[in-house]
Image: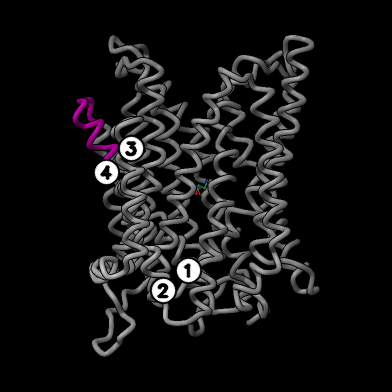
C-alpha cells in the first residue's frame, strides 16, 4: 500500500537497506552458530583457541538443538510485540540493539556470560527476524509482481551473510580464539545496526506502528482474544486437550518439551481465536490456507536441516573428500547451500515470474509443493551415496554436491516464496504474528530434523535417506493434488499480479 518510492535496479531502495541489515544479522547469527558446539565441547584447559566449556557431545548437541529452535520460536512474541505495541521498524531496531549486547556479552569468558549472551541473542533474533521479513513485504503494493523477486533478492542477502560468516569466523577463531569469534559477530551486528539507522530515510513508508483507532470495532487485543476463549466451549475443550498433551510431554519427555508444548498450546488457541475474529470469509479462508501451508514448512525444514546434522556427520566419516590431493574440510560443504543460493536465486525467481506472466501455474502453494519434491529428490543422491558406501566402503562427494544443489533449488522454491506469501495473505494487523508463526514452524522443523537424524543410529543412513525421499515426495504431491481447492480459498490473492511501475 505504498505511495511512490525511490527505486534502484527496478526495486524500492528500502529493499537494499533491509538486505544489508539482514545480511549482517545473519553473518552474526551463523558465525556464532558455527562456533557454538565446538566451543561447548572443547576442553576447559583449552587449546590454541582458548578454554572451551568441556561438555560432552550429547550435552552440547542438546543445548544446540534447543537454542536453534528457540531463536525461531521467539519470533512469535517478537511478531506480536511489533503488531500490537511498537511496529516492525522499531522492533527491528530493538532486536538489533539486543543482538549487539548479546554478542558483546559472549566475548566475556564466564559461564553466566555464556547463558546471558545466548538468551539475549534468542530475544534479539525473535524481535528482528520476523519483523524485517514483514517489512520487505510492506515495500510493495498489493498485486505488485516484483514482490516475489524482492524476497528472492532479500534471501540472497541472508545467504551472503551466512557464506561470509562460515568462511571468516573459523579463521578468526583459529588465530585469536573463541571469544574473538564471538566478538566479531558482535562487531558485524553493530554494522548491521548502523546500516539500518542510516537507511531509515528509505524506510519511512514501511513498518510503522498504527495505533488502533478508538472506534474500530474490529481492533482487538490479544488479552481480549484469550478472554473470548472462555466463552467458546468447543475451543476451550480443544485447548484443554492440547494442554493435557503438553503436561504429558513434560512428564514423559523433558521439562523443556513440556514448556514448549504449553507455549504452543497458547499460540494454537490464539490462532483459533483470531480465525473466529477475522471479519470476512475471504480472510478466514486465506488464514486457513496459510496454516495448511505451514505443514509443508515443517516437513520441508525437517528434511532440509539434515544438512547440519546427519549429512554433516556422514560427510565427515563416509565421504571421500580428497580433491587433487587436498582433503576438503567437512565444514566447507556447509557453504555449498549458501553459494548455490547466491548463484540461482534470481534465476529461479525470474523463471517463476515469466511463467506467471504467460498465464501458467505459478501460485505460491504450487511453488512450495514443487520445492518440497525437488528437495526430496536431493535425498535420492544420498541414497546412492549410502549404496556406494555399502559396496566400496567410501562414497564420492559428487553425490553430496548434487544433493545440496537439489536441496537449494527446493529451498528457493519454498522459503522466499513462503515469506512473500505470508505478506500477501495476512491482514496487516496480524502480519508480524503470522511471520513469527512461520519461523516457529521452521524452528520446529529443525527440531524434527534432529530427531529423525538421531534415528539413523538405529536404522542406518540408507533407510533414513530413502524414508525422507519417499515422505517428502508424497507430501509435495498431496498438496499438488489439492491445489485447486486451496487456490480457490485464497480468493484470488495472487491472480492479478502484474508489473506496476
Ligand atoms: N536460512 C534461512 C535464514 O536464515 C531460513 C531459515 C529458516 O527459515 N528457518 O533466514
Does the Cβ of the disc 4 residue fall within 8 Å of ligand 1? no
The residue tagged 4 is 120
The residue tagged 3 is 248
Characterize the local packing of mark 2: few (<14), some (14-19) or many (20 or more) Cα atoms within 10 angstroms. many
Magenta-span inclusion, residue 463: no
Distance from disc 1 to disc 4, alpha carbons, whole Å, reads 27 Å
- Give the quadrant of the C terminus: bottom right
Nearest to the observer: residue 476 or residue 423: 476
Distance from disc 3 to disc 1, alpha carbons, whole Å, reads 47 Å
The residue tagged 2 is 206
Compared to residue 176, the image places residue 494 above or below, namely: below
Residue depth check, mark 1 versus mark 2: number of the one nearer the observer: 2
Residue 392, position as x, y percentages in the image: 78, 10
Q: Secondary structure at mark 1?
A: helix
Please state if 7 lies on the left or on the right of 404 as rendered: left
CB under 8 Å between discs 1 and 2: yes
Amino acid at each position: 500500500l505504498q505511495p511512490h518510492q525511490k527505486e534502484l535496479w527496478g526495486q524500492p531502495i528500502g529493499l537494499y537497506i533491509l538486505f544489508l541489515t539482514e545480511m549482517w544479522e545473519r553473518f552474526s547469527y551463523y558465525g556464532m552458530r558455527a562456533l557454538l558446539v565446538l566451543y561447548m565441547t572443547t576442553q576447559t584447559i583449552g587449546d590454541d583457541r582458548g578454554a572451551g566449556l568441556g561438555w560432552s557431545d550429547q550435552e552440547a548437541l542438546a543445548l544446540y538443538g534447543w537454542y536453534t529452535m528457540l531463536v525461531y520460536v521467539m519470533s512469535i512474541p517478537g511478531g506480536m510485540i511489533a503488531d500490537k505495541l511498537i511496529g516492525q521498524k522499531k522492533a527491528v531496531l530493538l532486536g538489533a540493539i539486543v543482538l549487539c549486547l548479546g554478542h558483546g556479552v559472549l566475548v566475556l569468558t564466564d559461564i553466566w556470560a555464556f547463558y546471558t549472551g545466548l538468551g539475549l541473542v534468542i530475544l534479539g533474533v525473535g524481535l528482528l527476524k520476523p519483523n524485517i521479513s514483514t517489512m520487505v513485504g510492506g515495500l510493495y503494493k498489493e498485486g505488485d509482481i516484483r514482490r516475489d523477486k524482492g524476497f528472492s533478492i532479500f534471501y540472497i542477502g541472508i545467504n551472503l551473510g551466512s557464506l561470509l560468516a562460515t568462511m571468516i569466523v573459523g579463521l578468526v577463531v583459529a588465530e585469536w580464539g573463541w571469544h574473538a569469534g564471538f566478538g566479531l559477530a558482535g562487531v558485524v551486528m553493530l554494522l548491521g545496526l548502523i546500516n539500518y539507522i542510516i537507511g531509515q530515510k528509505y524506510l519511512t513508508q514501511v513498518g510503522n506502528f498504527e495505533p488502533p483507532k478508538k472506534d474500530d470495532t474490529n481492533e482487538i487485543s490479544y488479552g481480549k482474544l484469550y478472554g473470548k476463549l472462555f466463552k467458546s466451549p468447543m475451543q476451550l475443550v480443544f485447548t484443554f486437550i492440547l494442554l493435557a498433551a503438553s503436561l504429558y510431554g513434560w512428564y514423559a519427555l523433558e521439562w523443556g518439551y513440556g514448556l514448549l508444548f504449553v507455549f504452543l498450546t497458547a499460540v494454537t488457541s490464539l490462532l483459533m481465536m483470531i480465525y473466529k475474529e477475522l471479519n470476512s470469509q475471504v480472510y478466514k479462508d486465506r488464514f486457513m490456507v496459510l496454516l495448511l501451508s505451514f505443514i509443508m514448512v515443517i516437513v520441508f525444514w525437517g528434511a532440509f536441516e539434515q544438512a547440519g546434522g546427519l549429512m554433516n556427520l556422514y560427510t565427515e566419516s563416509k565421504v571421500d573428500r580428497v580433491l587433487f590431493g587436498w582433503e576438503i574440510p567437512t565444514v566447507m560443504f556447509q557453504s555449498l547451500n549458501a553459494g548455490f543460493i547466491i548463484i540461482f536465486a534470481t534465476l529461479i525467481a525470474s523463471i517463476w515470474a515469466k511463467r506467471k506472466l504467460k498465464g501458467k501455474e505459478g501460485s505460491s502453494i504450487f511453488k512450495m509443493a514443487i520445492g518440497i519434491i525437488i528437495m526430496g529428490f536431493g535425498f535420492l543422491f544420498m541414497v546412492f551415496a549410502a549404496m556406494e558406501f555399502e559396496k566400496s566402503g567410501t562414497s564420492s562427494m559428487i553425490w553430496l554436491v548434487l544433493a545440496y544443489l537439489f536441496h537449494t533449488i527446493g529451498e528457493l522454491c519454498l522459503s522466499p516464496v513462503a515469506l512473500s506469501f505470508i505478506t500477501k495473505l495476512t491482514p496487516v494487523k496480524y502480519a508480524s504474528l503470522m511471520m513469527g508463526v512461520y519461523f516457529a514452524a521452521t524452528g520446529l522443523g529443525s527440531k524434527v530434523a534432529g530427531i529423525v537424524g538421531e534415528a539413523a543410529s538405529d536404522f542406518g543412513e540408507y533407510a533414513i535417506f530413502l524414508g525422507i525421499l519417499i515422505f517428502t515426495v508424497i507430501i509435495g504431491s498431496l498438496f499438488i493434488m489439492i491445489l485447486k481447492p486451496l487456490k480457490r480459498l485464497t480468493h484470488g490473492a495472487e491472480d492479478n499480479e502484474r508489473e506496476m511501475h
